[in-house]
Amino acid sequence: MSISCSSDKLNTSSAYPKDRLVPATSMQEKMKRFSDNRVGANDAVKRVRDLGNQLLVRLLIPSRAAGAVIGKGGSFIQYLRSEKNAVINLPDSDNPERVVYISSNDMLNIVSCVAEIIPKLEEGRYSPESELRVLIHHSQAGAVIGRAGFKINEIRESTGANIKVFTDCAPMSSDRVVQFSGSRDAIVNALFEVMKLCQATPIRGVDQPYDPVNYDLDVVCSYGGFPPDKAWKNRRPIGGQMLGVRPVPAPFHGVAAAPPFASPIGVYAQPPPTIFAEGPLQTVRVTIPNDLAGSIIGRRGERINRIRQESRANIVVDPPVAGAVDRVITISGLPSQIRLGHFLLQQCLRSIPPLRRPGVA
C-alpha cells in the first residue's frame, strides 16, 4: 500500500497480499506473537507512551472484526507492524467491542495502517458505506467540532465524509467516540484532519482511556459503542448477569480501589438500573468518611470545583451531621455526567496518602 499527500488529500491504495501468511515456527514464537495483545487499556496506552513522542490513534472496533484485523496466524497485524513502521496492539476482550492501538512517530504511517484496516472491518458487513470509529479525549472534542460546529463542517465539506462526535464519554473513561462514514478515501482524509487537530490540542483534565472490560449495554448507543450480537446476549453466567455487564451498581463499575485500601465511597441510595438511559436529569447520593471530606473539597473548594467542571455534574457535599461518621455527597445531572463525577471522586480519594486515611495508623 502506498500513501501520499497531495493538495491536502491523501491517496491510498492497498498492497497487502491476501494470501500472505507468517510462516509457522516454534510454539514459543507463536505465543510471543500474541502475548502483547493480552493487555488492558491502561497497559496498552502506557506501553505506547513509554516509547517517547509517539503519535497514537485508538480505533473502536466490534469484537467480531478482531480476527480479520489480526489475520490468520497473526499475518495481517504483523504485516502492518513490519511494513508500516508502527506499533499496533489489540488487547483481548470478552465483550462486543475492542480497541486497536496504533502508534508511530509519523502521522502518515498511522493513517496508512488505518486505510488498510478499514476493509477488514467491512468483512461480513453489508453496507454501501465504510465506517470507522475513533476514540479521542473529551477535552479535544471541542477542537474537532469548532465554534458552532464550524471546524467539523469544514472537514465534512473538504473530505466528503460524514462525521459525528458523540456527546457522552465511553463507560468509566474520559474518551468520546468520533464516527466517520463514507467512502474509504473520504474517511482516511477526514481522520487525517482530525488527527492534526488533536495533535495541536493538549489533553486537559483526567486522562482515563476506555477499556472494553467496562462495556455497558445500557448506554452503548449514547456513547457510540457497538451493540452485542445475539450470541453474546445469550451468554449468561450464574446469577443471570450477562457476561461483561457487572451487577448493580453497574453505573460505577470498573474502578476498583487500589489494594490494600478499599474505596470509602459507598452507594447511599442505590439508583435503579434504568438511571443510565439518557433522559431527564437524575440524582444519586454517595457517602464518604467524615475524615476525608476535607480532602475531597480541597483548599477553598478547589478540588470539588475541578471535579464539577470536568464532569459537568452538580455535586454538593452535605454539611456534617452530629454523631454521624459519614458525609453525604449528592451528584445530579445526566447519567453520563453522574458516572464521570463518581469516577473522579474515587480518583481523588485514591490520591490521598495512606497516613491520612481513616483507620490507618
Image (cartoon, rainbow, N blue to C red):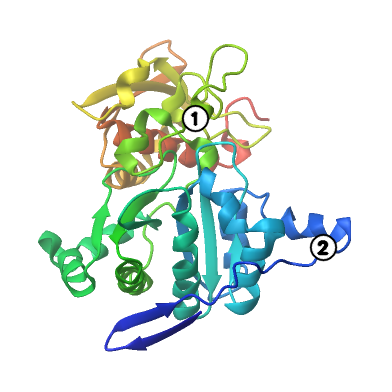
- In this view of the protein, which residue sits in the foreground, 116 or 55? 116
**In this view, the mark in front (1 or 2):** 2
Q: CA distance from mark 1 to mark 2?
A: 41 Å
* Residue shown at 41% from the left, 86% from the top: 4
Task: Give x and y (percent) for residue 316.
Answer: 28, 29
Q: Is residue 79 left or right of residue 165?
A: right
- In this view of the protein, which residue sits in the foreground, 104 or 303? 104
Q: Is residue 141 left or right of residue 53?
A: left
Amino acid type shown at disc 2: Ala
- Sequence order check, earlier mark of 1 and 2: 2
Q: Residue furthest front?
A: 19
- In this view of the protein, which residue sits in the foreground, 247 or 284? 247
Q: Is residue 116 left or right of residue 338?
A: right
Residue 155 falls in image quadrant = bottom left
**Which mark, by number, is residue 24?**
2
* Residue shown at 46% from the left, 33% from the top: 229
* Residue shown at 25% from the left, 30% from the top: 278
Amino acid type shown at disc 1: His
Residue 95 falls in image quadrant = top right
Task: Give x and y (percent) for residue 15.
Answer: 53, 77
Mark 1 = which residue?
Answer: 253
